[in-house]
Image (cartoon, rainbow, N blue to C red):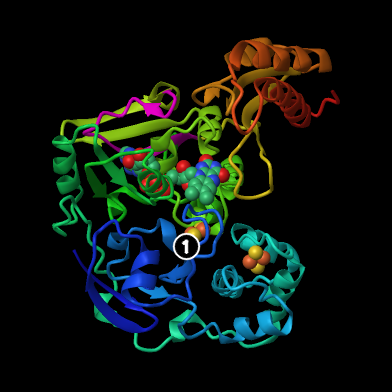
Amino acid sequence: MKLEFEVNGEARALEVEPLRRLLDVLREDLGLTGTKEGCGEGECGACTVLVDGVAVNSCLVPACQTTGARVETIEGRGFEAVQQAFLDEGGAQCGICTPGMIVMTRAWLEECAARGVQPDEQGARVALAGNLCRCTGYGAIVRSAIVRRQSNLSHAADAPGSPVALRGVRQIALAPYDRGTEALRSVLEQLATADDTTRVIAGGTDLMVELRTGRTKAARVIDIRALDELRGLREESSGLRIGALETCADLRRSPLVRERFDVLSQACAEVGAEQIQARATLGGNLGTASPAADLTPVLLALDARVRLISLAGARELALDEFLVGYRRTARRVDELIESIFVPWLASGTRCAFRKVGTRRAQSISKLVVALALRVDAGKLVHVRASAGAVAPRTLRLRALERELDGRAPTPEVLRRAARAAALEDATPIDDVRSTASYRRHALARTLVTLLAELTTVRA
Ligand SMILES: Cc1cc2nc3c(=O)[nH]c(=O)nc-3n(C[C@H](O)[C@H](O)[C@H](O)COP(=O)(O)OP(=O)(O)OC[C@H]3O[C@@H](n4cnc5c(N)ncnc54)[C@H](O)[C@@H]3O)c2cc1C
Ligand code: FES
Ligand code: FES
């Protein structure tokens, strides 16, 4: 396909394979070797660049999704002041990680400025959590990031030479990448002839890694990221409809989601680091159906429903019916996940989310738990509990729900219910991240703690 986009203020056009990584286009085709490759799997942040002002891992971005975009790399303008701060404060520790850290820092400072938030150490640590350092530590890096607040920030929009004509040219790359019409219908027509070697790509944070490592083989890939029909939040009389292409960053920042489903905001903030959240979509999280996914437990506890569309029509399934097994869903190959419907919470409902991993950010959950319940006249009602990473798929904890519903939340009741979840609901196995017995133990402990917090009973 012909890729037309803007790189560091210059209009560029070149022939590329649609799924070629933006990282390779920049380094190999355009000679912009300041952007580095560390892990190649979205974990280290060395390849961070700005796409339309948003920091992303260029190793996970397919070239076809940058058509018409504005890409900025460390060689571009607007990074000078951050670079100087990294020099002055000793944050430039090694040549592989530093460019990505500087790019991420600029994106964060611009976001702070846009939101009127004062950059501080805690914010810098969260923002840079996806930029790994394994040599020296983060003291000087974080100092470099926040010292920047003293100087003037030249905003990305000031960068010269933006070819306005290229903006908004985004087109869907349809296999065989003929850059055809961008209508939803044409995607559904492509899917109507799909088989199980056809994949759709949204943010690509799962699929790009799977294709690269060979864990997934695809004969045909259909890019759906430009489908506006799959975006947006819609308030309906009985709940909120969330477009499948809404990203974790969109949901985390949405005042509506924070106000009505704060537990979902919290879970979105735990998905990878900033660069991942900028691309990871809700539909993709459900589409992968990883047993360790962080959003599925919350959505199960919230009684969410998944709307699937195809040329044959639409159908809506409870999320519990949609998840059918290890990385398997009830989606037919001709269907797209269009949206996720989350019913409004009844007044007085309390929710909780907890993720247990090996480090604060970028860790795959060893355990993830979500709860929603009400205490009515001293009794627990409408208890919804779910857990991930304790079975081949994300589970509703029905034994726990059975033990709690209609009972007063005494410490003994909470402990008995948590034990039932660990022994009856969970079916963990030993794997590289944890043993089965650790997971059962952690599940029971986490449930008791969260239930005690939600019911304000000391366990
Ligand atoms: C470094 C790193 C850290 C991560 N950390 C976490 C984490 O902490 N927690 C977590 O839960 N996940 C994590 N992930 C996984 C991933 O980011 C999420 O699962 C994300 O939500 C996937 O969304 P996506 O848009 O990138 O999906 P894609 O990669 O585009 O697609 C994923 C799958 O879903 C299918 N799909 C996507 N959209 C649709 C649709 N609308 N209709 C039908 N099928 C669709 C695709 O065909 C594909 O099979 C991490 C990934 C990386 C690389
Ligand atoms: S190379 Fe490590 S995140 Fe891209
Ligand atoms: S800055 Fe590169 S490993 Fe520490």
Q: As drawn, is 458 to the left or to the right of 309?
A: right
In the rendered image, which quarter is residue 100 located in? bottom right
Q: Residue at x 29, y 56 (%)?
A: 19
Circle 1 SS class = strand
In the rendered image, which quarter is residue 279 located in? bottom left
Quarter of the picture containing the N terminus is bottom left
Vertical position of residue 66 compared to residue 368: above or below = below
Q: Mark 1 points at which residue?
A: 56
User: In the rendered image, is residue 242 in sight?
Assistant: no
Q: Residue at x 49, y 24 (%)?
A: 393
Q: As drawn, is 224 to the left or to the right of 281?
A: left
Q: Nearer the viewer, residue 349 or 438?
A: 438
Q: As drawn, is 333 to the left or to the right of 375?
A: left
Vertical position of residue 285 compared to residue 34: above or below = above
User: In the rendered image, is residue 398 in sight?
Assistant: yes
Residue type pointed to by label 1: Val
| Residue 51 percent coordinates (x, y) | 41, 69
| Residue 281 percent coordinates (x, y) | 43, 47
Q: What stretch is highlighted in magenta?
A: 325-343
Q: Which of 223 and 240 is in front in this view?
A: 223
Vertical position of residue 49 compared to residue 301: above or below = below
Q: As drawn, is 216 to the left or to the right of 263?
A: left
Q: Answer whether residue 450 is magenta in the image.
A: no
| Residue 286 percent coordinates (x, y) | 42, 36
Q: Residue at x 44, y 75 (%)?
A: 33
Tell me the crowding category of disc 1: few under 14, some 14 to 19, or many 20 or more residues within 10 angstroms, Cα based: many
Q: Nearer the viewer, residue 248 or 233?
A: 248
| Residue 312 percent coordinates (x, y) | 16, 31
In the rendered image, which quarter is residue 117 located in? bottom right
Quarter of the picture containing the C terminus is top right
